[in-house]
Amino acid sequence: MALNLEAVGQKIGPVKKDYRWKDVILYALGVGAGFDELEFVYEKDLKVIPSFGIAAVFEFLSHIAQKAEVNYAGILHGEQELIYHSPIPTEGTMVTEGKISDIFDMGKDKGAIVVGESVTCDEKGRRLFTSVIRLFCRLDGGFGGKPAPAAKVEIPERAPDFEDEAQPSQDQPLLYRLSGDVFQLHVDPEFAKMSGFEMPIMHGLCTHGYACRSLIKNLVPGEPERVHRLSCRFSRPLYPGDPIKTQIWKVEDGKAVWRTINSKTGDVVITNGVFEYGDIPKDEIRFDGKVAIITGAGGGLGRVYAKDLAARGAKVVVNDLGGARDGSGGGSVTPAQKVVDEIVAEGGTAIANYDNVATSEGGENIVKMAADAFGTVDILINNAGILRDKSFLKMDPESWQAVLDVHLNGAYHVTRPAFAVMREKGYGRIINTTSAAGLYGNFGQTNYSAAKMGLVGLMNTLKIEGRKYNIKVNTIAPLAASRLTEDILPPDLFDKLKPEYVSPLVLFLCSDRCEVSGNIYNAGMGVFNRAAVVTGAGTVIGDAASWPSVEDVSAAIDKISSLKNGKEYEELNAVVGDIINAFSSPAKAETPAADDSAGKFTDVAAVFDAMTGAFQPDAAKGVNVVFQYDISGDKGGNWFCEIADGTCSVSAGTHDKPTCTLSMSDTDFLAMMNGELPAMQAYTAGKLKIGGDIMKSQLIEKLFKL
């Protein structure tokens, strides 16, 4: 099987992990802690060994392997980096989200490297740590991909400053695996031999935990909360019972390099170790090195966005024509320059721009000024706006066009050159400004409402075109006091609608932590929510042989109008696909929403009855295998599936020479067949056991479409 290169960039998660203080202690015991480190193994004044983080989210690693479709028989944990943002609590819930960031090809006989990046937060959203995992896939190389960049940590040519000896027991993997890594390579002698090892090997992450303890002991004794970064490469396998030695060199204040050696053989089993320690930097969103353009930033919301971005390190282009609220007049340099002066006085970096966004030349000039002054553009907030409110019949063409020119055309004029810069560099954040008037309507604002809804359409397509360039495009609908609303809102409400209440959400959407794109958010007075276009399930009227009549539509208008079981769509093609599918298989009756059993297997035997019909002969060319299924439980039994020469047969019983044997409980098997339990997750969690040729078991998902 080939690696799934399309998995790069796809979101993984959220993956949740609930844990208690007993799990923290079990992990500590699994990595060798004992009475000499009571703070790690006794619930009184308990502290967490920082490397517990990766063990607690081990399930995320399985999702990486599953999405990349690696050959499980050749998978090893190659490298691991952990960057800590807050101390890990002694119990709670960890929520992990991330993606496969890259796949490298080391060559046909050398394997591949799959890189997964993730951020883990607690249940309240506080960031705990960032993880970068590199899986070494020994059997997946040679697909013609790019090579991995070279990375080497230099070890000083002197004796280490600290050396720690340790003696894992021969049974250490049996204890460590209870923290989540139940991969057969570390416990099953037959599987280990099939994978090329004499016997089950130590978990690399278990040895990693031993090293973490040593680093804490020698560099931050008793203060695991001061560990900032821990990274390394797993270079050689280690057999249980072999003694290890962790060697540590201090290279500067707050930083050390390290490695772990097999004391018995002299082999380096962990290399390229880096350990950074000290007070963990405050976990805050920063914009150091980023360049932001904010249009209409001479007052109100734009001014607050500009000042807040600058306060967090961004270099800001403050654009404002300085015209009247209705766009009339020749403009003024005063509003934009005043904001720049405020930013500079507070230690920030900013320049003023007075171009008119309503012209293409103005848009080009704004982006050019940013590039000339600061070298690039990372962030664009389309905030400029004017008002010319009139009831529709009094809305003259000039008032209509003037508002569209600033709001909608203005966003186009600035975004187009900014988007080109962002696409070239592979990064960008764009925020459009819509309004509740555009989303929901408001009397006397047809021009404004049309322009503001047009900005949502602009976002919807830009999110698609920017997707592969890491350009995130979102839209904010702020409710805030500004010169556009000062005589529209009651004075007491106007005072409560501070722009400062809106700015935090906008700054998040501008940050590199923002992974969402194509979303609309309402914000005001500290209240935030998301708005979306939702399409109802609808109904099919007529068929290919007859058109529906007006009367047919009239009779079905309640079903057509219903938003029950509605859904969001990412793009046009998804809508068209659902329409085609609905017409091909029109719904006969509306199924009650509470009925979750429809289309799901409730009996194990029914799965095997369905297998021959789900067989894909085109995927079976040249395949000759026998899959034996041993399902335990009241609904279980034994079945085997023979595939040969493009044919498939399924029989009850036990085959005398199966290619591989798959064993699991009836409840887990049904959950897997119903799509509720991913196969890779079942395997790594020990719910699915595979004997024989594990490589061939990976053919099952290709051969059957249940």
Image (cartoon, rainbow, N blue to C red):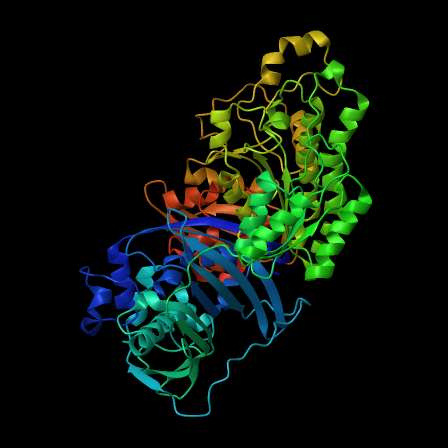
Measured from the top left, where is residue 114 in percent x and y? 56, 64
Q: Looking at the picture, how far across and down is residue 363, in whole percent?
A: 76, 46
Up/down of 74 relative to 69, above or below: below
Drawn side of residue 319 relative to residue 177, left or right: right
Counting the numbered discs, the total is 0
Q: Nearer the viewer, residue 311 or 116?
A: 311
User: Measured from the top left, where is residue 454 in percent x and y?
Assistant: 70, 32
Q: Nearer the viewer, residue 280 or 640?
A: 280
Vertical position of residue 511 compared to residue 332: above or below: below
- Visible residue check, residue 514: no
Instruction: Please identify the quadrant where the C terminus is shown.
Output: top right
Q: Is residue 2 above or below residue 428?
A: below
Tell me what residue is drawn at x 37 percent, y 61 percent. 53
Q: Name the residue furthest top.
A: 551
Specify whether residue 108 is in view: yes
Instruction: Residue 333: give x, y in percent of width and height.
Output: 70, 46
**Which corner quadrant holds the N terminus?**
bottom right
Q: 457 and 339: which one is in front?
A: 339
Give the residue at x 75% y 15%.
Answer: 394
The image shows residue 451, relative to residue 120, as above or below, that is above
Please tell me which residue lies in front, 215 or 71.
215
Q: Quadrant of residue 289?
A: bottom right
